[in-house]
Image (spheres, grey):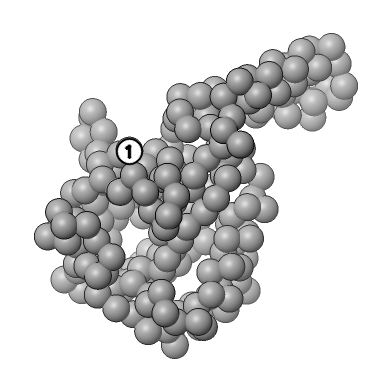
Amino acid sequence: MRIVIGNVLSATQLADLRAALAKARFVDGRDTAGFAAREVKHNLQTSAADPAIETVRQMVREQLLANEVFALAVRPKALSLMFSRYEAGMRYGLHVDDAIMGGMRSDVAFTLFLSEPESYDGGELMIDSAAGDDAIKLAPGALVAYPATSLHRVAEVTRGARLAAVGWARSFVRDAAQRELLFDLDTARRTLFAQHGPSREFDLISKSLANLLRMWAED
């Protein structure tokens, strides 16, 4: 399942994050790429050795975990994330993310956009599908999450600079189809409760949701 979530960060949080990244040390993104990805990766990313970044990284992590839609769609057990920068002429060719990212299995990938879309040209996240590439370019503070099994690329930036937080989640539910079923059930039961309050139908859906999660979750 692919999902777009808006307003993950507030305007104040965005401003603080951008200010921190303006002072951060960025290094060649190929330093952390696998042998094949290294051939198609051309971007910058924050240095893992930069302690000043840890504060804003933790802030983003907390906002993601506190976001109700992200929690329902991803069922995150652990998160790993970094900050990337694409300047004019930079791009990331077609690739699939490593199965192990940041010492954990990568089930879900996500990109949290940080730059105003009109401030740069190109830089779309292109996710491969049976119908062709789907181009995604979102407002700052908005996020797209998708299965980490997907082939994807970042189109070349031709003007300006593209800042983003990119990351991966290990989910309590490994299977993408199962995560989508749980998301749909949870959305339906919450809508039912909001419209009608407690009911026998709500209780039965809640029971089924809990038991499916019990069957599929890896703790």
Kindly indicate the quadrant of the structure image that contains residue 157: bottom left
Compare residues 50 and 20 and report the one nearer the observer.
Answer: 50
Q: What residue did someone put label 1 on?
A: 149
Question: Which structural element holds mark 1?
Answer: loop
Q: Quick one: which residue is furthest to the bottom in this view?
A: 23
Q: Quick one: which residue is furthest to the right in this view?
A: 198
Residue 69, x across and y down, in percent: 61, 42
- Judge from the rendering whether residue 213 lies leftward or rightward of residue 46; answer left or right: right
Residue at the (41%, 74%) spot, across then down:
48
Residue 115, x across and y down, in percent: 41, 69
Q: Quadrant of the N terminus?
A: top left
- Judge from the rendering whether residue 139 lies leftward or rightward of residue 134; answer left or right: right
Above/below status of 81 relative to 43? above
Residue at the (49%, 44%) spot, across then down:
170
Kindly indicate the quadrant of the structure image that contains residue 28: bottom left
Please rate how many residues cluster around mark 1, counting C-alpha atoms within 10 Å: few if below 14, some from 14 to 19, many from 20: some
The answer to whether one can see residue 24 in this image is: yes
Amino acid type assigned to the residue bearing label 1 in the image: Thr
